[in-house]
Image (tube, rainbow, N blue to C red):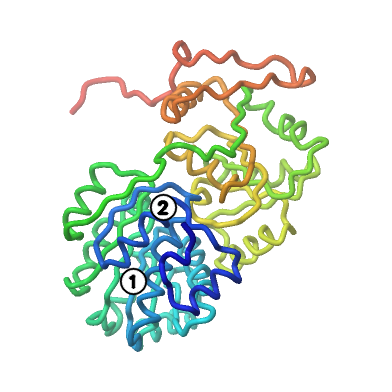
Amino acid sequence: MTFDDFYFDYGLMDALDAMGFNKPTPIQEMAIPVILEHKDLIACAQTGTGKTAAYVLPILNKIAESDHSHLNTLILAPTRELAMQIDQQVQGFSYYIQVSSIPIYGGGDGATWEQQKKALKHGADIIIATPGRLISQLASGDINFTKLEHLVLDEADRMLDMGFYDDIVKIISYLPKDRQTLLFSATMPPKIRTLASKILYKPEEISISISKPAAGIDQQAYMTYDNQKIPLLGEIFKGTSYQSVIIFAGTKDKVKSLQFELKKIGLKAKSFHSDLEQKEREELMNDFRSRKVQVLIGTDILSRGIDVDGIDLVVNYDVPPDPEDYVHRIGRTARAETKGTAITFINEKDQRRFHAIEGLIEREIPKTPLPASLGAAPIYSPRTSKPEHKRTFKGKRK
């Protein structure tokens, strides 16, 4: 199948040709016909499968073929980075058609707020919003949703994990009931099913390769003590040609400290965290995309919040607590059927976590021996290792 089989608007096809899109991914091949038929949809697909284009393309096609002098589509996303990423894709695909869009997210100045308010009031065709910011805008002005035709919830599981359930329900109360609703989620826990049952009407369901890393990812792991991790990174980068690397750490404080530690061993590293101003975050992402920054360090917000092609290496400096987050992290590399490497550092406390990851992806990840110069490593024995320390309280409960 090619995109010609969908009989899209000529302007949309010109944009696809210009961007080098010719063959749809599995999620696009399955979702686009359902959306074109104006059916509600639940789609379970992980990061890197092309899910954004799976809903953006048919919606753009519908807008291009209709009178679209009003707010037509609302897309909800969990983070400002994802909202910006979706808006960039909308702008790219709509280059040859007259469709307007604007991202609505927090962190900007007063001028940004007013620009967003004006777009909501007078009606851009497509609004891409984080729930919290949209709630604030709804409370401050008159927004006309009466002609809205499409609602999309992207990364719905992440939005619920971040506590946006009530905001989503409140936003939906402003929308017309006669609309098409599309729910995209990387996982499908019971709380997503509960939400879907409330807001979708007789939805079609699609599930694509859930919880399985892309075949093009070379997954590796090292057993290592914490004090060996920085020297190990130095050894990994020796004699290699990695141009674009993401390192995931467990906390914001560790992300900040790693930036300085990596600079000491000669790596061009920058940390990405919530203490940065929005302008600083945007400049950092642009520098990373253009390869001015070789190594980007962040927490799990990066695992779903950015879209950068050509990432050579992903390093899990800390094992993620949720096995699903491992899949999202390493999904930043080997996108669109390319190749990439993912390396995880496992200390003596994280063995059970990593064993759970191996259970989820149904394969054992090879444990590469440490370079001899770094000394002895912990032995991988997850069934006998002690779990992480948990605080206990002595005495009687009151």
Q: Judge the density around disc 1: few (<14), some (14-19), many (≥20) Cα neighbours within 10 Å.
A: many
Q: Which of marks 2 and 1 is nearer the N terminus?
A: 2
Q: Residue 393 appears in which quarter of the rendering?
A: top left
Q: Residue at x 43, y 84 (%)?
A: 114
How far across and how far down the image is residue 86, in percent? 47, 65
Up the image or down, 353 lies above or below 241; here it is above
Residue in the foreground of this view, choosing between 81 and 95: 95
How far across and how far down the image is residue 276, in percent? 57, 60
Residue in the foreground of this view, choosing between 235 and 86: 86
Residue 68 lies left or right of residue 297; in this view the side is left
Up the image or down, 85 lies above or below 262; here it is below
How far across and how far down the image is residue 353, in percent? 46, 26
- Look at label 2 and name its amino acid: Ile
How far across and how far down the image is residue 211, in percent? 42, 38
Residue 242 lies left or right of residue 173; in this view the side is right
Q: Is mark 2 on a helix, strand or loop?
A: helix
Q: Judge the density around disc 2: few (<14), some (14-19), many (≥20) Cα neighbours within 10 Å.
A: many
Q: Which residue is drawn at 39% across and 65% down?
A: 130
Q: Residue 139 appears in which quarter of the rendering?
A: bottom left
Residue 343 lies left or right of residue 363; in this view the side is right
In the picture of the structure, the residue carrying the numbered disc 1 is 74
Q: Which residue is drawn at 35% across and 23% down?
A: 392
Residue found farthest to the right: 239
- Look at label 1 and name its amino acid: Leu
Q: Residue at x 22, y 71 (%)?
A: 179
Q: Is mark 1 on a helix, strand or loop?
A: strand
Residue 27's label in the rendered image is: 2
